Image (cartoon, rainbow, N blue to C red):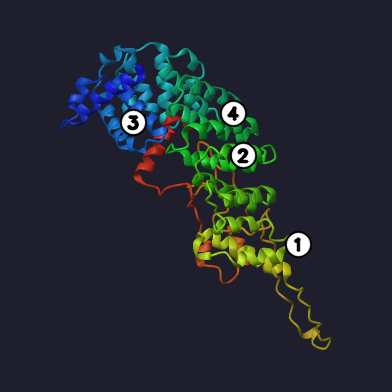
């Protein structure tokens, strides 16, 4: 009740301020800590799936930045305003504004040490940030600042000290449940659990994320980490546990997740996992099956393309509607059909050279085209097989995907048939779970980086 009353009051003041032609009223009416608290409440709504609040977030960032640039030493005598300045920086604020405001503030040595660490973090100096923040225990700070600091420290230590990072991320969740901080901490925990090979933690934090933040604008990053984790930990995660987690998703998201798992598993040669995921994608829910989905048919066929039932596989591949596949999947289809054709093709008989002509024959050139170009899955490297990330890089972000075992793309031409579309030579980075990269998405990514992704 108290939180709802505070939200109502702050939103009322905010709407009054934004209705004016200038930001002057907002600066006179609201203290920095009130503006930052309003920003946090809006971001928490966005994390819970209220994407309509995104324009309000942009306006609040603008108003808060103006208020903090105008703040003087007197404003920062209120400890709440100084803490709000640091939280603003870690919530996607302007690093220049934070550094300038800190230079005008007078505070105790511990707060100034925290400020230095936050500024180093925002300016891409992770080593200095870790050193400055090392002696600071987030659990001893007021909850609003401690949660953000635990998230930042956990993100900074994720690579070199993953166990310590997971402890800090647990603290962030404990200090700020139901918020954007918890959403980010859960999402980062998924990726670290994968690198640690901790299947139990991976399943637990994935379950918590799906339960609470499936409709967050950052959920596509979770999907990347989840699919990569299922592939990396497939020997430790039962199919029943995987089904339990995905059953909490809506039918469309569940189908897409299974399609992505089936594709990655097929390419990496995990036939059992690929068959299971493809079957679940085809099965559907609520009486709506996906048996006609050409992607499910393709992925379920890939892992059996060299089996004893090759004629059945060839027949299934022949029924797939190419027009409903992406460029990358059309290249996969071409490769699968080419390999299936090689399996059933009779061995070519070698001609017997004429003894009389043999001395006059020139030496043959090396047959480089006969070199093996298949990857660990028995499939050639094709478009879209390197990474499931929405970006071009095949590495994890704040929680990233595991690169596939594909061979260099330059060898793919020796396997694909001549009829394969020219577009198959390019890199297909589109992902069915990601929307187009828009201005709003870029802003969200920037905010997420400031919120706890280790600076690159």
Query: Is mark 4 in CB contact (under 8 Å) with mark 3?
Result: no
Q: Which residue is mark 3?
A: 94
The crowd level at tag 2 (other Cα within 10 Å; few <14, some 14-19, many 20+) is some
Q: Is residue 198 visible?
A: no
Gap between marks 1 and 3 measured at Cα: 61 Å
Location of residue 121 in the rendering, given as x and y in whole percent from the top left corner: 44, 28
Q: Nearer the viewer, mark 4 or mark 1?
A: 1
In the image: residue 357, left or right of residue 167: right
**Residue shown at 47% from the left, 37% from the top:** 214
- Residue depicted at 52% across the width and 30% down the height: 186
The residue tagged 4 is: 162
Nearest the viewer among 376 and 223 is 223
Q: Earlier in the sequence, mark 4 or mark 3?
A: 3
Graded by Cα atoms within 10 Å as few (under 14), some (14 to 19) or many (20 or more), the crowding at tag 1 reads few
The mark nearer the N terminus, 4 or 2, is: 4
Mark 4 vs mark 2: give the one in front: 2
Residue 270 locus on image (x, y percent): 68, 49
Task: In this rendered view, identify the residue nearer to me: 411 or 11.
Answer: 11
As measured in the structure, the alpha-carbon distance from the residue carrying label 4 to the one carrying label 3 is 28 Å
Return the residue nearer the eye: 146 or 319.
319
Other residues around mark 3 within 10 Å, as few (<14) / some (14–19) / many (≥20): some
For mark 1, what is the residue? 308
Name the side, left or right, on which 336 lies relative to 13.
Answer: right
* SS assignment at label 3: loop
Task: Say above or below: 424 vs 362.
Answer: above
Closer to the chain start, of discs 1 and 3, is 3
Q: Quadrant of the N terminus?
A: top left
Checking the image for residue 405, the label placed there is: none
Q: Which is closer to the viewer, label 1 or label 3?
A: 1
Q: Which residue is mark 2?
A: 242
Q: Residue at x 26, y 29 (%)?
A: 63
């Amino acid at each position: 009740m108290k939180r709802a009353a505070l939200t109502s009051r702050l939103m009322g003041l905010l709407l009054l301020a934004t209705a004016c032609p200038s930001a002057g009223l907002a600066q006179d009416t609201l203290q920095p800590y009130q503006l930052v608290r309003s920003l946090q409440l809006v971001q928490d709504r966005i994390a819970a799936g209220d994407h309509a609040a995104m324009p309000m977030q942009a306006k609040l960032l603008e108003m808060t930045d103006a208020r903090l640039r105008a703040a003087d030493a007197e404003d920062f005598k209120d400890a709440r305003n100084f803490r709000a300045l640091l939280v603003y920086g870690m919530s996607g604020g302007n690093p220049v504004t934070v550094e300038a405001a800190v230079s005008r503030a007078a505070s105790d040595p511990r707060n100034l040490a925290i400020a230095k660490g936050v500024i180093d973090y925002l300016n891409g100096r992770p080593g200095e940030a870790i050193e400055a923040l090392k002696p600071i225990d987030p659990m001893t700070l007021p909850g609003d600042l401690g949660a953000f600091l635990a998230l930042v420290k956990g993100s900074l230590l994720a690579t070199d000290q993953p166990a310590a990072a997971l402890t800090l991320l647990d603290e962030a969740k404990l200090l700020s449940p139901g918020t954007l901080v918890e959403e980010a901490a859960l999402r980062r925990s998924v990726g670290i659990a994968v690198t640690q090979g901790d299947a139990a933690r991976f399943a637990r934090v994935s379950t918590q994320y799906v339960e609470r933040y499936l409709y967050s604008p950052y959920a596509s990053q979770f999907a990347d980490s989840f699919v990569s984790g299922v592939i990396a930990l497939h020997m430790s995660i039962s199919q029943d546990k995987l089904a339990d987690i995905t059953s909490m998703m809506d039918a469309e998201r569940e189908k897409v997740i299974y399609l992505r798992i089936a594709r990655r598993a097929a390419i990496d040669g995990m036939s059992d996992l690929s068959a299971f995921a493809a079957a679940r994608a085809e099965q559907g829910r609520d009486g709506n099956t996906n048996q006609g989905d050409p992607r499910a048919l393709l992925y379920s066929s890939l892992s059996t393309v060299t089996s004893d039932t090759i004629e059945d596989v060839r027949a299934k591949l022949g029924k797939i509607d190419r027009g409903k596949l992406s460029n990358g999947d059309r290249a996969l289809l071409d490769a699968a059909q080419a390999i299936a054709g090689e399996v059933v093709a009779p061995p070519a008989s070698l001609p017997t050279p004429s003894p009389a002509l043999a001395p006059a024959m020139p030496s043959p050139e090396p047959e480089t085209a006969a070199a093996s170009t298949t990857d660990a899955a028995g499939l050639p490297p094709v478009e879209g097989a390197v990474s499931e990330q929405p970006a071009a890089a095949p590495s994890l972000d704040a929680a990233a995907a595991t690169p596939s075992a594909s061979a260099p793309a330059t060898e793919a031409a020796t396997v694909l048939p001549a009829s394969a579309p020219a577009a198959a030579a390019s890199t297909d980075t589109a992902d069915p779970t990601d929307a187009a990269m828009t201005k709003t998405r870029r802003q969200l990514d920037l905010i997420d980086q400031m919120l706890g992704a280790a600076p690159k």
